[in-house]
Image (cartoon, grey):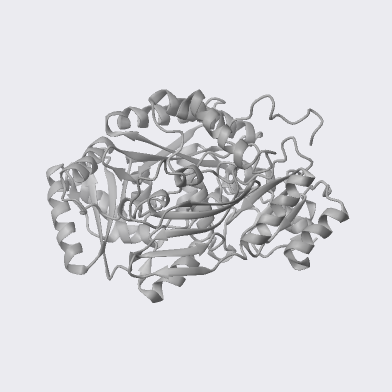
Amino acid sequence: MKIPHSVWYGWGDPARAKPLAAGGLEYLRATLGLDNVDATHPPVDFADIGLRPSGLDDEVLDKLRAICGDAHVSADSTERILHSGGKSTPDLLRIRGGDAHRAPDAVLFPGSAEEVRRVLELCVRRRLAVVAFGGGTSVVGGVEPLRGHLDGVLTLDMRRMDKLLHLDALSRTATFEAGIRGPAIEAALEPLGFTLGHFPQSHQEATLGGYVATRSAGQASTGYGRSDDLVKAVHLETPAGPLDVGSLAPGTAAGPKLLDVIVGSEGTLGVITSATVQIHPLPEHKSHGAWSFESFAAGAEALRKLRHEGVRGDMPHVCRLSDTDQSAATFRLGGPKTAALARYLRLRGQQSPALALFLWEGDKRETTARKRRSARILRAAGGIPVGPMPARAWERGRFSGPYLRDELLTRGVFVETLETAATWTRLEATYAAVRGAILDALEANGGMGYVQTHISHVYPDGASLYFTFLGGLEQDGQAQNTRVKKAASEAIVAAGATITHHHAVGIDHAQYMQAEIGTLGLEVLRSIKETLDPTGIMNPGKLIPETDNDAPPKDKP
């Protein structure tokens, strides 16, 4: 078995991973009451990972090789293990423990929409499930290779389809193949004077197809827009045939917007092979700022006023507000300068402040004016300006969070995230209910729990809430995760918030889709799937809750 160069048990580039410093270890001891964080719990050796044999016979493999080429079809154990799941905590607990029994029967690397089409035709005939795989960054079970009631499962890794196909500089649109990753998108656009402006935390690994399929939001989406704001048109290969949705016209009244059926469809209707997106001029200037508020509620009210009372277009591109728990961690672990900042705020009367970070982008004169007008609103709302340093520090580490999770798991710390969004009217109650539900579930077995929260996206009618939570890793980490996630999800539904703001539905949230869109709404989705995927080969078990007719036989592995 070939040992991969990538971090098969965690995130990204191993050269970017850093061990926890002494201050971080001490913070874990104090916050979670853990005495054993100095000990490490490494993953099993790669060679010891359990894997069932591929169920594909030579005839099927030969047909797949005839479509994609010998070098682009693999039933090799290494590739199958690397495509056995995404990057959720349950995914990582499984693979770190040596369990890859859900691995696909083979991994394909198609090079064109035509190849994808022919693969789907073969899979319909041979009753093989198909899972599209971009960067593999799903944290909700979205790329788990489930076979459902079918005879096998293939994963289609889209990495070969990574080209810029067309750019219309005058209309500011660009068409890319779906397998292109975030950094490559920016590398293609920057010499031409443009940016997509879409920077989720998974940016360095995630693909354009993944952005579209999951209706993702990026860290600068308050300014540039979410992926569903940016996408103009999509080409989809479905088991029923190719489908083009969307329009390059600036507006249309030609019936319902079928593009919205495909955006967020999570690979359950077909494989996205290319997409046309709105692009933006590369900003010539960035201006950072940070403000502190006496409480999370006060900071949220300031963001609401900034959105409602500010001049249209003045909102920062990045707009983040940490609650007092997350802010306290920043002040304690951020070094001498942030410690000094905390002392200054205490002198100003803020004993447990909530820290807000902002980033304005654009023309220098315009950006300066926008920042100045925003400052008047934030100051009137009780904010204290604390300079650009916290926002610059955040920007330097904006993609490093997943590496910290790997280190925490190695230290025996359970860590996971979830997110939602609520109206301004319901935001504070949603925050309190979900945070309380997570803490209660974390502490159900006698341990200590810790939750920190931030707002990362601000809308005219509300904002997102992103929860990060930690506890001692229990002997059955999967059951621990299920308990906490269930409690939080039920609290979200009860609060009238959305079950997911940008992580998508996948397996984790499928059971809550009826609360999200209603019984009739689910029937509409099932009808669309029946039209585009009548044999049900596309990404079984995701997005749409299974009915009794969908359930696999009892003896199906």
Task: Look at 42% across and 57% down and name the residue there.
Answer: 199
Could you tell whether 508 is left or right of 313 in the image?
Answer: right
Point out residue 164 in the picture as x, y percentages from the top left corner.
Answer: 50, 69
Point out residue 246 in the picture as x, y percentages from the top left corner.
Answer: 44, 51
In this rendering, the count of numbered labels is 0
* Front residue of this view, candidates 457 and 454: 457
* Front residue of this view, candidates 29 and 510: 510
Q: Does the image show residue 447?
A: no
**The N terminus, quarter of image:** bottom right
Task: Look at 79% across and 46% down and name the residue there.
Answer: 126
Image: 430 above or below 230: above
**The C terminus, quarter of image:** top right
Query: Given the current orientation, which residue lies at the most extreme front position?
Result: 254
Task: Look at 42% across and 27% down and name the residue there.
Answer: 436
Point out residue 351 in the picture as x, y percentages from the top left corner.
Answer: 24, 40
Could you tell whether 189 is left or right of 139 in the image?
Answer: left
Query: Given the current orientation, which residue lies at the most extreme right position?
Result: 58
Query: Given the current orientation, which residue lies at the most extreme bottom position?
Result: 191
Could you tell whether 146 is left or right of 503 in the image?
Answer: right
Point out residue 250 in the picture as x, y percentages from the top left corner.
Answer: 33, 55
* Front residue of this view, candidates 208 and 219: 208
Q: Does the image show residue 357?
A: yes
